[in-house]
Image (tube, grey):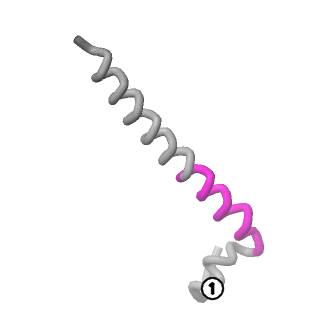
Amino acid sequence: MNWNSLQDFLAMGGYATYVWGSFGVVFASMALEILALRRREQLARQEAP
């Protein structure tokens, strides 16, 4: 694919909603996983003798 401008790149050939929405879901899932891991680590450290 050849983009002539930033606008063309962001439009992703008419599939921008799907493409950028997918990226958003992936990064949000990764952030939530990191937060969940930190929370579980804190709980494990509190329960450890």
Q: Position of residue 6 (x, y in %)?
A: 57, 84
How many marks overall? 1
Q: Quadrant of the C terminus?
A: top left
Q: Residue furthest top?
A: 49
Q: Is residue 22 magenta?
A: yes
Q: Nearer the viewer, residue 2 or 30?
A: 30
Q: Position of residue 33 (x, y in %)?
A: 49, 39
Is residue 33 left or right of 47 when viewed as pictured? right
Residue at the image point whose x is 37% and y is 36% from the top = 38
Q: Residue furthest left?
A: 49
Q: Nearer the viewer, residue 21 or 12?
A: 21
Is residue 34 left or right of 24 when viewed as pictured? left
- Where residue 8 sits, quadrant-wise, is bottom right
Which region of the structure is painted magenta?
14-27
User: Magenta residues: mostly which secondary structure?
Assistant: helix
Residue at the image point whose x is 58% and y is 50% from the top = 26
- Where residue 44 sits, quadrant-wise, is top left
Q: Quadrant of the N terminus?
A: bottom right
Location of residue 29 with respect to 37 vertically, above or below: below
Is residue 32 left or right of 4 when viewed as pictured? left
Location of residue 14 with respect to 38 vertically, above or below: below
Graded by Cα atoms within 10 Å as few (under 14), some (14 to 19) or many (20 or more), the crowding at tag 1 reads few
For disc 1, the marked residue is: 7
Q: Is residue 7 magenta?
A: no
Residue at the image point whose x is 56% and y is 45% from the top = 29
Q: Nearer the viewer, residue 17 or 2?
A: 17
Q: Position of residue 12 (x, y in %)?
A: 68, 73
- Where residue 20 sits, quadrant-wise, is bottom right
| Amino acid type, mark 1 | Gln
